[in-house]
Image: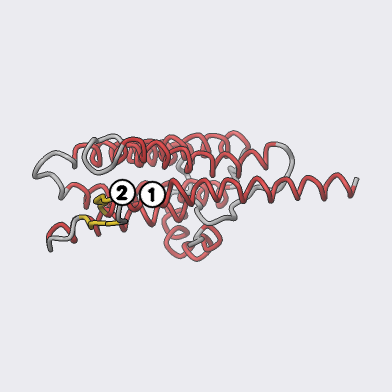
């Protein structure tokens, strides 16, 4: 699942709004997206309380809204001719905080996910992003390749909370796995976090290898 390469297809939803807000400072839009991500994390965190499972739906909506603002700031900057290194840097910083807020809300609420799995998921997500931006920082091409990009995380973080609520309503909020000597239950959100933990770290390794190869080619061409 690699959606970062399909970002251009979302232009139809961004361009009309960006044109209407072309006089708005893109950094302000970035701040709005970050604040929404923080609220989303809080909503996910308190959704673990008894009777508040429905808040997962609210959190899923906030993930989409935050992701939309995250994409909108760049579109406004391009249309207004306000693209800058400082703006790009701020966007990367806010993206990492947004990841921590939203994923951390599920990871550490103490109900939806084993905290150790949650930490591994955060490590996978942060390393994936770091390897992409670090490539750019050392002069290699910026990387969006790999199995788990930011767009993928946004989509999964929207779909799985909704699935969790629906499956709980029909009596399948978690499923039982029996491996003989090992027996455990895992819910749908833990499955998502497991994907972030495993595939996120695989993506980080993929990007490391790609960047190493790109640097080798650059050295040979000099």
- The residue tagged 2 is 190
Tell me, for residue 162, which label it has, or none.
Answer: none
Taking depth in this image into account, of 133 and 131 the one nearest to the observer is: 131
Image vertical order of residue 222 relative to residue 8, above or below: above
Where residue 83 sits: x, y (%)? 60, 43
Taking depth in this image into account, of 176 and 214 the one nearest to the observer is: 176
- The residue tagged 1 is 194
Q: Secondary structure at mark 2?
A: helix
Left or right: where 211 falls relative to 133: right
Taking depth in this image into account, of 68 and 159 the one nearest to the observer is: 159
Left or right: where 209 falls relative to 66: right
Where residue 149 sits: x, y (%)? 51, 52
**Residue at (81% x, 47% y) in the render:** 216
Q: How is the image coloured?
A: secondary structure
- Quadrant of the image occupied by residue 167: bottom left
Do the CB atoms of the residues marked 1 and 2 lie less than 8 Å apart?
Answer: yes
| Other-residue count near label 1 (Cα within 10 Å), few / some / many at <14 / 14–19 / ≥20 | some
Q: Residue furthest left?
A: 51
Image vertical order of residue 171 relative to residue 94, above or below: below
**Residue at (45% x, 50% y) in the render:** 72
Q: Is residue 25 visible?
A: no
Q: Secondary structure at mark 1?
A: helix
**Residue at (23% x, 40% y) in the render:** 43
| Other-residue count near label 2 (Cα within 10 Å), few / some / many at <14 / 14–19 / ≥20 | many
Specify the quadrant that holds the C terminus.
top right
The span from disc 1 to disc 2 (Cα, nearest Å) is: 6 Å
**Residue at (32% x, 35% y) in the render:** 115
Where residue 24 sits: x, y (%)? 45, 42
Q: Is residue 91 visible?
A: yes
């Amino acid at each position: 699942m690699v959606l970062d390469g399909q970002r251009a297809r979302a232009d139809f939803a961004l361009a009309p709004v960006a044109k209407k807000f072309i006089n708005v400072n893109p950094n302000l839009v970035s701040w709005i997206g970050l604040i929404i991500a923080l609220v989303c994390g809080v909503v996910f965190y308190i959704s673990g309380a008894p009777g508040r499972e429905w808040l997962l739906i609210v959190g899923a909506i906030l993930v989409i809204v935050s992701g939309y603002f995250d994409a909108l700031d760049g579109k406004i900057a391009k249309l207004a001719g306000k693209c800058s290194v400082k703006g790009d840097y701020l966007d990367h910083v806010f993206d990492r905080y947004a990841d921590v807020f939203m994923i951390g809300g599920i990871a550490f609420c103490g109900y939806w996910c084993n905290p150790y799995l949650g930490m591994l998921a955060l490590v996978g997500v942060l390393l994936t992003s770091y390897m992409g931006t670090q490539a750019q920082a050392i002069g290699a091409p910026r990387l969006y390749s790999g199995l788990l990009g930011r767009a993928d995380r946004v989509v999964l973080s929207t779909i799985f909370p909704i699935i969790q609520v629906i499956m709980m309503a029909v009596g399948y909020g978690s499923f039982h796995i029996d491996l003989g000597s090992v027996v455990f239950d895992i819910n749908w959100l833990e499955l998502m976090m497991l994907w972030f933990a495993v595939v996120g770290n695989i993506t980080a390794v993929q990007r490391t290898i790609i960047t190493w190869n790109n640097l080798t080619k650059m050295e040979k061409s000099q």
